[in-house]
């Protein structure tokens, strides 16, 4: 018997990377999963993988920056599975550049896919979450928490998501909906490429981190997401959860 038997989860950006790790972990615990993904190829493959393993998954192609498409994801989910119990806002597109090189287009990409996408999904899922209570898990980043160079657009969008999370936690609490935000420090494919390309740079960056490494998406990060999605976290809300080996310790 899984921790999430009978639950229905929408996970954005879940065709690959961390989002896919979350989808696989929640499916293993018994949740039905909607893969809300912009990339049709990876989204379809993710749903097939879950279904082939005995899980229950639906793929819906979605640009999270478009509210009409977000609403369609929720509509399709309810038609297929009956409700929404868990929302994980993971999707985000962005680019990196110095502040003096940051354009309106850079800011708009980060904020529309990150901050507005998160807002759109919380709004669309709320009518279903409030029926029996539920879980919302948003995503922030050390790039915003620490103010990392070249991440003006991405980091500021992620910090705005932290603000949305706290407001939603207060507004949704009376409906037994918890809203938390996770800052993951994960060894994604991009991070693996960096480690292989610049092992000394990776080592130097990890040196101040207490656990001195990035987390494995499946073994280190996804279990924390399962916890936040389950009844085990029912008394936690409005919190920033740092799944990063201590990278942002004390900040």
Image (cartoon, helix red, strand yellow):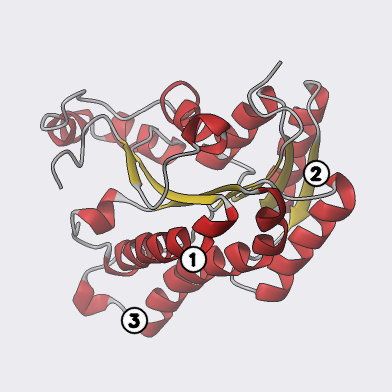
Residue 16, quarter of the rendered image: top right
Around disc 1, counting alpha carbons within 10 Å, would you say few (fewer than 14), some (14 to 19), or many (20 or more)? few
Q: Which residue is drawn at 27% across and 68% down?
A: 152
Is the N terminus in the top left, top right, bottom left or bottom right quadrant?
Answer: top right
How far apart are the alpha carbons under marks 1 and 3?
34 Å
Q: Residue 53 carries which label?
A: none
Q: Which mark is residue 58?
A: 2
Looking at the image, is mark 1 or mark 2 nearer the viewer?
Answer: 1
Q: Which residue is drawn at 60% across and 27% down?
A: 25
Q: Which of marks 1 and 3 is nearer the N terminus?
A: 3
**Location of residue 132 in the rendering, given as x and y in whole percent from the top left corner:** 69, 48
**Location of residue 48 in the rendering, given as x and y in whole percent from the top left corner:** 80, 33
Q: Which of marks 3 and 2 is nearer the N terminus?
A: 2
How far apart are the alpha carbons under marks 1 and 2?
30 Å
For label 2, the SS is strand
Looking at the rendered structure, the number of numbered marks drawn on it comes to 3
Left/right of residue 241 with respect to residue 189 in the rendered view: left
Residue ID for mark 3: 103
**Location of residue 12 in the rendering, given as x and y in whole percent from the top left corner:** 61, 52
Residue 90 seen: no
Left/right of residue 112 with respect to residue 107 in the rendered view: right
Depth check, front residue: 242 or 108: 242
C-beta proximity under 8 Å, tags 1 and 2: no
Residue ID for mark 1: 171
| As drawn, 115 above or below 107 | above
């Amino acid at each position: 018997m899984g921790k999430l038997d009978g639950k229905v989860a929408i996970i954005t950006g879940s065709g690959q990377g961390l989002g896919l790790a979350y989808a696989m972990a929640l499916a293993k615990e018994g949740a039905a999963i909607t893969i809300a993904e912009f990339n049709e190829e990876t989204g379809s493959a993710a749903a097939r993988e879950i279904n082939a393993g005995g899980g229950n998954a639906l793929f819906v192609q979605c640009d999270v920056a478009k509210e009409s498409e977000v609403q369609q994801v929720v509509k399709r989910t309810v038609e297929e599975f009956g409700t929404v119990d868990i929302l994980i806002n993971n999707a985000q597109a962005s680019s990196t550049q110095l502040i003096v090189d940051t354009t309106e287009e850079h800011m708009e990409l980060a904020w529309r896919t990150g901050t507005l996408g998160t807002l759109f999904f919380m709004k669309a899922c709320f009518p279903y979450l409030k029926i029996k209570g539920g879980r919302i898990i948003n995503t922030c980043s050390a790039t915003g928490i620490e103010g990392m160079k070249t991440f003006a657009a991405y980091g500021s969008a992620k910090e705005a998501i932290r603000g949305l999370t706290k407001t939603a936690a207060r507004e949704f609490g009376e409906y037994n909906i918890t809203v938390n935000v996770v800052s993951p420090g994960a060894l994604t494919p991009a991070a693996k490429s960096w480690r292989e390309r610049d092992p000394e740079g990776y080592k130097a960056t990890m040196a101040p981190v207490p656990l001195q490494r990035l987390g494995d998406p499946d073994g280190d990060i996804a279990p924390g997401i399962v916890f936040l999605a389950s009844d085990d976290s029912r008394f936690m809300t409005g919190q920033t959860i740092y799944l990063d080996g201590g990278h942002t310790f004390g900040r």
